[in-house]
Image (cartoon, grey):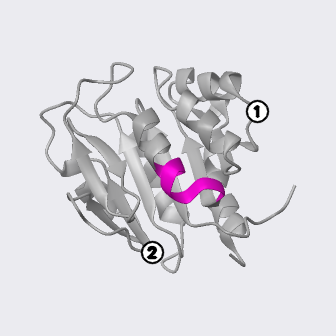
Amino acid sequence: MSSHLENASAVVVGTSWGGVEALSIILRKLPADFPLPVIIVQHQHPNSDDILSLILRKRALLFVKEAEEKELLMPGTVYIAPANYHLLIELDKTLSFSNEAPYNYSRPSIDLMFKSAVDVYGSGLIGIVLTGANDDGAMGLKMIKEFGGMTLVQEPSTATMDSMPLAAIEASPVDYIVPLDEIAPLLVELVSGS
């Protein structure tokens, strides 16, 4: 298996229960010059404010912000889906929100964000499923794999809740099953030379 993805263009991440700590561990280890946009769906309470982006900003070398409607995705920036909206990536690489019904009991939905990212980035997409207590993200990660993207799943034994990683592994073959503290170094390796 290639140690880097030739056309890496974006990273999408889905997580739920235990995600704040998992994301903190990954973002602490991603260098300030990481060249891709990172788009994250973390399941949150519908009434949450932007506290998640503020927490993660203090723990990351990259710039972390809550996603904004019609915002153009920029390299080296981490975008957090706002609470109670589906976050989608449009063909012109801008972000959009939807308040359609929860999908797979979730809004924002990891699966919907992953699907929209596949439509834009195809084989240049890196998808990651982290800790969580449901199976949101499994079908979206499968779609990323089917379109030639790279798929990573947190090693279930290192997850706070292993349901999401196990569901993703069961849904389709994944490229890497990685302990949490090894995900950031692997991402750096995958995008080097891209």
Residue linked to disc 1: 173
**Quarter of the figure that contains the C terminus:** bottom right
Q: Compared with residue 38, is residue 141 higher up or lower down, i.e. above or below?
A: above
- Report x, y in % for residue 22: 48, 44
Q: Main secondary structure of the magenta part?
A: helix
Q: CA distance from mark 1 to mark 2?
A: 28 Å
- Secondary structure under the numbered disc 2 in the rendered image: loop
Residue linked to disc 2: 75
- Secondary structure under the numbered disc 1 in the rendered image: loop
Magenta residue check for 93: no
Residue at 45 percent of width and 74 percent of height: 76
**Quarter of the figure that contains the N terminus:** bottom right
Marker disc for residue 81 = none
In this orientation, which residue lies closer to the viewer: 63 or 29? 63
In this orientation, which residue lies closer to the viewer: 106 or 165? 106
Residue at 28 percent of width and 24 percent of height: 102
Nearest to N terminus: mark 1 or mark 2: 2
The magenta segment is 117-123
Report whether 96 appears left or right of 9: left
Label 1 sits on what residue type?
Pro
- Report x, y in % for residue 138: 56, 29
